Image (cartoon, rainbow, N blue to C red):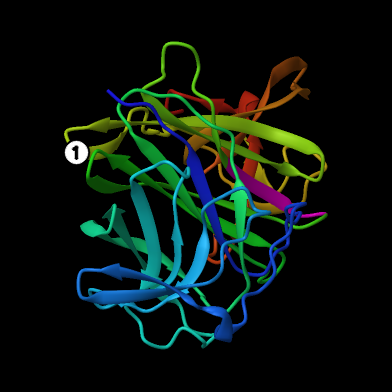
Amino acid sequence: MGQIKSILWIGFGLLWLAAPTWGQTAVDQGTYSDTLLIGSDTLYLSPADDQSGTNLRPCKGQLQGVNAFFIGKTQSESAYSYVIGTKTADTENANQLVQLTVLLLHQDAIVSLLDLAYYFSPAYQSYLYPVTLFQANSFDEVVEVNMNQAFCGGFAGSVFLVRKERQLLQGPTISQTGEPGMEYHYQELVRPAKGSAGELWIKTSVGIDDIEYFQEIERYQLQSDSIVLLNPKTPDTYYVTAPNGLWQRAEPSAQGPTLGLLPYGTPVRVLNKTVFEDSFQNYGQTLTGSWVQLEYIGPPYYDHSIFVFDGYLSKSKPD
């Protein structure tokens, strides 16, 4: 079994995270001077950027009907290259979302083509980020294709590609959303724990500003030529036991804004337990428990987390 040789992170979009310190300038359309022949097709490549420390180069041309705009390797000595592009002809319209296509090249031959379930707006400056190396069994290389765009606060999304020999597979997708004073949802690839070297781990953190509500880990593994989630979440069902009902809140706190009352006996699905514990007086008795995240029950179009105090929840349905 191979090791993950390295991870290439290609970013599309307006940069709202910190820019890499080495910098990369936009390539003038007239500077595509180098050429690469792949079968009967020709790619026109920009001059190499020696300061980047990578092998990512803007390009233009068509390969098997794919309009290419990046070609890159995870490391210079690799025999494999990745061509990033789209089958959509119009790549200058900022209002158009297009599907991403990736071609895997072995030396100068196309060995795999993958249409991703991943859409982006291509009419923005692009960046390349170095990413920490991982070692794992099961994979030969992992590539992270990343889109950064500042729409309604901030958004970044990524999709992971896994190469096993000459086969290219789509892995998990992640996202980062949030803005100051609002709830953030941040996902990232993290190093697996000892004994889990054949897996990809995605960590999700949810909170507000510098306060973290909870974390969770998704574990993925290559099985029979597909990427499988090893620990799918099955929300637990509980019932509201508060005689006068239980308020859903926008923050894990009794001071959090209310978002609808859950009547006595209402079934709810608990998604995550937060780090916040609390206690309340209930008819002369002290209830202790934690604030938990629920599946939202209420009017549509609310896209943030919902919390309740679990001292008023029970696995048994009340009479």
Instruction: Residue 85: give x, y in percent of width and height.
Output: 39, 70
Secondary element under disc 1, as helix, strand or loop, is loop
Task: Say which of 187 and 13 sits in front.
Answer: 13
In the image, 173: left or right of 198?
right
Task: Say which of 131 and 233 sits in front.
Answer: 131
Label total for image = 1
What residue lies at 51% left-to-right and 87% top-to-bottom?
92
Q: Is residue 23 above or below residue 249?
A: below
Task: Say which of 32 and 119 sits in front.
Answer: 32
In the rendered image, which quarter is residue 166 located in?
Answer: top left
Residue 183 within the segment the image draws in magenta: yes
Instruction: Residue 215: give x, y in percent of width and height.
Output: 61, 31
Residue pointed to by mark 1: 225
Q: In the rendered view of the protein, which quadrant contains the N terminus?
A: top left
Q: Main secondary structure of the magenta part?
A: strand
Magenta segment boundaries in residue numbering = 181-187
Q: In the rendered view of the protein, which quadrant contains the C terminus?
A: top left
In the image, 79: left or right of 148?
left
The three-letter amino acid code for the residue at tag 1 is Asp
What residue lies at 83% left-to-right and 42% top-to-bottom?
255
Q: Is residue 151 visible?
A: yes
Q: Is residue 108 above or below residue 45?
A: above
What residue lies at 54% left-to-right and 32% top-to-bottom?
133
Instruction: Residue 302: give x, y in percent of width and height.
Output: 59, 61
What residue lies at 62% left-to-right and 76% top-to-bottom?
27
| Residue, far front | 34
